[in-house]
Image (cartoon, rainbow, N blue to C red):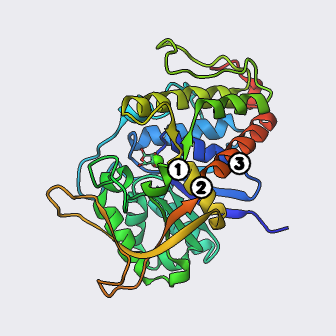
Amino acid sequence: MTPPTRLIVDVDTGIDDSVALLYLLAREDADIVAVLSTAGNVPTAQVAANNLAWLDLCGRPDIEVAVGADGPLKIPLRTTEDTHGPQGIGYAVLPPSTRALSERSAAQAWIELTRENPGELVALVTGPLTNLALAIRADPELPQRLRRLVVMGGAFQHPGNTTPVAEWNISVDPEAAAEVFAAFSSVPEDRAPIVCGLDVTERIELRPDHLRRLAELADSTPVELIGSDDAPDARSTTSNPIVRHLSDAVRFYFQFHRDHGQGFIAHMHDPFAAAVALDPTIARYRAATVDVETEGRITRGQTVADWHGLWGRSPNAAITWETDADAFLDDLILRLAAFARTVTPPGNRTDR
Ligand code: BDR
Ligand code: CA
């Protein structure tokens, strides 16, 4: 049997980051070495608290959680509670964790883990690239020591979701993203970072029926169908804590997407990137040289892809271009359900 993929996961948890985390925990072919917390959707302390709480709920207090920088390299932090809820996890209220955070910073963890496991670790970043950029500043050889980097970020031939041209993760810290893409220009092309931009991730549409099926498959009762017209204080009462908290988190994300004219759906950006990190064959790619606009008056944060070598620089990215969204969503629900069935949270809490 192939050994599980060992992963560094750097997140700004975040509703879809939460789903990504649960999905990775659910997969037997994934071994999360550390969860690193980046400021983005919510401030870094809240991101770390969310990471600890999800790991506790899933019975994984053994996984290291480290905190990253308070904010971007050069500009003040912007957060987006309107997208992800006041705590970043929608309407979910997780029991707070009592365990300690790692004593090392996220940037230190990046450096030390890749030194201890050269060529072995796959890294998944589903938030701004601040921690990774800081780590590379301190240790420019770091990109050479990763087996592969997978990033959720950017919008290539697709509108942005934060400005007309910029995607959120890149837009929060464009300097960090520019530095990371430049640093990875030195790795061989067959190990170029995989970049999951909005071009593909906005095609991954989770719907209420998926969550209904999740509850059904997890034997969680009652099986609920989240509706767009539900009362504002509607919350899940289903028996399985993972299904219940996930439903409360994603309900908020459905409403956010609806309120922005995208329908009562939720884009699963980060879970898709997590799946790609474990199995790149689920997508097809286009090679390009990617750079990030850091100056533009109205284009700051735009990811520019040179598809045709016009800059005379080698490709530094494999951009996800096509995938079978339904197959991925089926896999997501099946694995989350199987996982939810097996996990008994510590003390079988009476939390909600
Ligand atoms: C990205 O922005 C965040 O709000 C999501 O968690 C995802 O990582 C999508 O643009
Ligand atoms: Ca994210």
Q: Which residue is denoted by mark 2 in the rendering?
A: 274
Amino acid at the residue labelled 3: Asp
| Image coordinates for residue 86, horizontal then vertical, percent | 41, 28
**Is ligand 2 less than 8 Å from the beta carbon at label 2?**
no
Q: Which residue is mark 1?
A: 270
Indicate the amino acid at tag 1. Answer: Asp
Helix, strand or loop at label 3? It is helix
At a point 73% along the width and 26% down the height, the residue shown is: 240
Tell me if mark 2 has few (under 14), some (14-19) or many (20+) residues whose alpha carbon lies within 10 angstroms of its own.
Answer: many
Tell me what residue is drawn at x 55 percent, y 24 percent. Answer: 93
Between label 2 and label 3, give the one nearer the viewer: 3
What residue did someone put label 3 on?
331
Residue at mark 2 to residue at mark 3: CA–CA distance: 12 Å
Give the CA distance from mark 2 to mark 1: 6 Å
Q: Nearer the viewer, residue 36 or 151?
A: 151
Report crowding for label 1: few under 14, some 14 to 19, many 20 or more residues within 10 A (C-alpha). Answer: many
Q: Are marks 2 and 1 in contact (CB under 8 Å)?
A: yes
Q: Position of residue 79 (x, y in %)?
A: 33, 40
Against 333, residue 168 (above or below) is: below
Say which mark, if any, is on residue 44.
none
Q: Tell me where residue 223 sits by quadrant.
A: top right
Q: Is residue 196 left or right of residue 4?
A: left
Q: Amino acid at mark 2?
A: Ala
- Compared with 273, 245 (above or below) is above
- Figure quadrant of the N terminus: bottom right
Q: Dots 1 and 3: beta carbons under 8 Å?
A: no
Residue density around tag 3, few if under 14, some if 14–19, many if 20 or more, within 10 Å: some
- Label 1 or label 3, whichever lies nearer to me, is 3
Question: What residue is rendered at 35% in x and 85% in y?
Answer: 313
